[in-house]
Structure formats: C-alpha cells, structure tokens
Image (spheres, grey):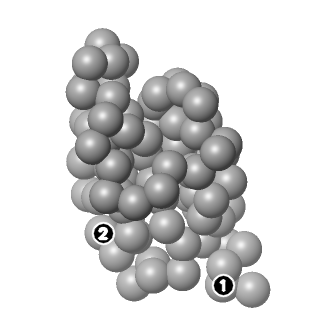
C-alpha cells in the first residue's frame, strides 16, 4: 500500500486540458492502486488551495509541484516512483 505519499491534481472544469488530467488520475490509480490521489476542481474546492497552485492543471506530490500542465505518463510514473522510494527510506 502506498499510503506514505499523496498526489493532488488541481483542475478547473472549464479547462480544456484538464480532461486529460482526469484520465491521467485514472491511469495512476490503476498503476499505483494504494496511492492516495485527489482530483480537486479549483472552482469547487473542499479545502484551502495551496498558494503554489496558480495554474491548472497542477500536480502536487506531497505538497511539492511536480508538474504544471499534464506530464507524460512516463515522467509521472518516474516522479511517483521517486516519491515512493524516498518515503520508504
């Protein structure tokens, strides 16, 4: 189980590129089934939006920006794996 790290993807429902973000979130869920993943619509947030989020889509891994815009799947996989390796130490 990958409960040690959290991926948050900030989107806006009116953003044309954010549909891809939702697809990437589904892909991450399939490839990292125990990872905590949240897709947050900035138009309807359930909590405070971090100050570092100033554009959509924005990907945060444990609160650190790993991508402004949609990353390639390979790059996203590498960043998550690096985060998991760091969390296991």
In the image shown, does 10 or 28 lie closer to the viewer?
10
Write the residue at 25% across / 36% down: 23
Q: Position of residue 25 (x, y in %)?
A: 32, 46
Write the residue at 64% across / 45% down: 51
Q: Which residue is mark 1?
A: 88
Left or right relative to 2: residue 51: right
| Element type where label 1 sits in the image | helix
Left or right relative to 55: residue 2: left
Q: Position of residue 6 (x, y in %)?
A: 49, 67
Left or right relative to 57: residue 85: right
In the image shown, does 68 or 52 lie closer to the viewer?
52
Q: Name the quadrant containing residue 47.
A: bottom left
Eyeballing the image, is 84 above or below 4?
above
Task: Mark yes or no: residue 33 visible.
Answer: yes
Q: Position of residue 15 (x, y in %)?
A: 33, 18
Eyeballing the image, is 38 above or below 57?
below
Assign the C terminus to one quadrant of the image. Answer: bottom right
Q: Which residue is mark 2?
A: 33
Assign the N terminus to one quadrant of the image. Answer: bottom left
Q: Mark 1 or mark 2, which has the lower sequence index?
A: 2
- How crowded pointer 2 is (Cα within 10 Å; few <14, some 14-19, many 20+) is rated as few
| Element type where label 2 sits in the image | loop
Which residue in the rendered view is the most extreme toward the top?
16
Please tell me the numbered disc located at residue 77: none
- How crowded pointer 1 is (Cα within 10 Å; few <14, some 14-19, many 20+) is rated as few
The tally of labels here is 2
Q: Position of residue 26 (x, y in %)?
A: 25, 48
Eyeballing the image, is 14 above or below 9?
above
Write the residue at 24% across / 27% down: 13
Q: Whole-Å distance between the Cαs marked 1 and 2?
A: 17 Å
């Amino acid at each position: 189980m990958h409960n040690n790290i959290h991926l948050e993807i900030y989107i806006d429902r009116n953003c044309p590129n954010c549909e891809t973000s939702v697809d990437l979130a589904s892909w991450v869920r399939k490839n990292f089934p125990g990872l905590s993943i949240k897709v947050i619509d900035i138009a309807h947030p359930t909590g405070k939006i971090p100050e570092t989020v100033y554009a959509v889509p924005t990907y945060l891994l444990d609160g650190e920006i790993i991508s402004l815009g949609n990353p390639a799947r390979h790059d996203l996989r590498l960043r998550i794996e690096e985060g998991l390796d760091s969390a296991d130490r």
